[in-house]
Structure formats: C-alpha cells, structure tokens
C-alpha cells in the first residue's frame, strides 16, 4: 500500500493549498479528510483534464478575493487599534497579543471578516508600544494597521490626570466668578 498519493486540490485553504495545485499527501489524510470533504481529487487522466476548468474557477475566485480585499482596505488601511493589557514593571505583557487577537479586534471594530491567517504577525506582541502590522488578504493589496499596546494602569493614570485637570479648571473658573461677583457687590455698595 502506498504511503503517499497524488491529489489535485479543488478548494483553497490559506497556508495549506490552492485550487488546481497537484501535491503528494499521506494516504490517510487524503482518504479520511481531503476526499470526503471534496477538497481534493485523485490524479487520474479524467481529473487532469478537469484541471483546466479548476484553474478558471481559481482565477475567478482570486478576482473575487482581490475585490473583497480592496473593499476592506478602504475601511481599515491606516486605522489604529488599541489594546489595554496588564504589564510587568519593565513594560512586558502578562501573556501576549496574537494575530488572532488583532483579527478579532478588526472584525469587532470595523465589521470585517478576517481570520488569523490574514494578519501578517511573525511573532506575538509581548511588549508595550506601537507596531505597524500588515494585513494580507491578497498578494496585490497591501493593508497596514497601527497596533498600540498600552498598560492598563498607565491608561487609568492618564484618565485620572485629565479628570484632575478638569476639576482644577472648574475650581479656578468658580473662584474667578466668585471674585468677580464680590468685586461687583463691593462696587454696587460704594
């Protein structure tokens, strides 16, 4: 029994295979997954002849993906995502921010349908700072997103400082108003 067999893929899976691609795969993988799911077919004379129609199907699907990528680019290109996370004293994160986290955040904020394979993040983000991340839906469409990783406490401190400044400004306004009211009363008495 052959340990590998040659198949022609009928679907595209990101990072795994493309429509019309011929490849040797393990027999069990082909018989138990690819063939029953209709993701591939065995290489035979008849199936090789169907390869031309598969290639046309593939080019049509690539055009659809490119159009979708252009639409998504119009929405998210250059946008900024903020992640507020707990950190150590040195700015290192407890945990990390992965491609999956970025894709979910983009989907939630901009109503897209991206998955972790679309986000080109070589290693998970483990430190605070700003990062420029590429989103690759199609090879011809370049999309860039700015990811800002902030410390939760730092963000709270900034909010508290802003509230304190607002309160101080209100007190000063009230003080100047009361001073002007007292001056007005003194002038009216005289």
Image (cartoon, rainbow, N blue to C red):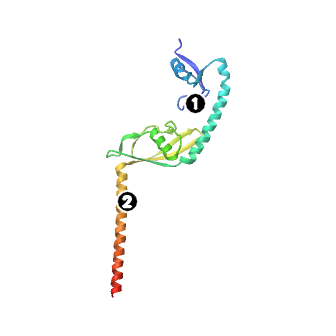
Q: Which residue is mark 1?
A: 12
Image side of residue 49 versus residue 28, left or right:
right
Q: Residue at x 58, y 21 (%)?
A: 7
Q: Which residue is mark 2?
A: 162
Which quadrant is home to the C terminus? bottom left
Earlier residue among tags 2 and 1: 1
Q: Residue at x 50, y 39 (%)?
A: 119
Q: Which of the pair 91/52 is nearer the observer?
A: 52
Residue 138's tag is none
Judging from the image, what secondary structure is the residue with disc 2 in?
A: helix
Image side of residue 187 versus residue 42, left or right:
left
Residue 136's spot in the image, x, y percent?
A: 54, 39
Image side of residue 126 versus residue 7, left or right:
left
Are the two marked residues, 2 and 1, in contact with CB atoms closer than 8 angstroms? no
Callout 2 crowding tier (Cα within 10 Å): few <14, some 14–19, many ≥20: few
Seen from this angle, which residue lies furthest top?
A: 1
Q: Residue at x 58, y 38 (%)?
A: 139
Residue 151's spot in the image, x, y percent?
A: 37, 48
Q: What separation in Å lies between label 2 and label 1 (alpha carbons)? A: 51 Å
Residue 88's spot in the image, x, y percent?
A: 32, 44
Q: Residue at x 36, y 67 (%)?
A: 170
Judging from the image, what secondary structure is the residue with disc 1 in?
A: loop
Residue 21's spot in the image, x, y percent?
A: 60, 26
Number of marks in the rendered image: 2
Callout 1 crowding tier (Cα within 10 Å): few <14, some 14–19, many ≥20: some
Q: In the rendered image, which quarter is residue 58 located in?
A: top right
Seen from this angle, which residue lies furthest bottom?
A: 190
Q: Which of the pair 109/59 is nearer the observer?
A: 109
């Amino acid at each position: 029994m052959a340990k590998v067999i040659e198949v022609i893929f009928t679907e595209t899976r990101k990072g795994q295979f493309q429509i019309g691609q011929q490849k040797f795969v393990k027999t069990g993988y082909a018989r138990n997954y690819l063939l029953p799911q209709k993701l591939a077919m065995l290489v035979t004379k008849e199936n090789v002849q169907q390869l031309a129609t598969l290639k046309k199907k593939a080019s049509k699907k690539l055009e659809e993906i490119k159009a979708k990528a252009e639409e998504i680019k119009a929405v998210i290109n250059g946008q900024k995502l903020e992640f507020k996370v707990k950190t150590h004293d040195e700015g290192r994160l407890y945990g990390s921010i992965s491609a999956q986290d970025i894709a979910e955040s983009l989907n939630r904020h901009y109503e897209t349908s991206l998955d972790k394979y679309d986000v080109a993040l070589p290693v998970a983000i483990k430190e605070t700072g700003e990062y420029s991340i590429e989103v690759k839906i199609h090879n011809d469409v370049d999309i860039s997103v700015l990811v800002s990783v902030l410390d939760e406490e730092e963000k709270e401190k900034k909010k508290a400082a802003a509230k304190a400044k607002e309160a101080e400004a209100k007190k000063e306004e009230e003080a100047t108003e009361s001073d002007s009211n007292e001056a007005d009363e003194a002038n009216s008495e005289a």
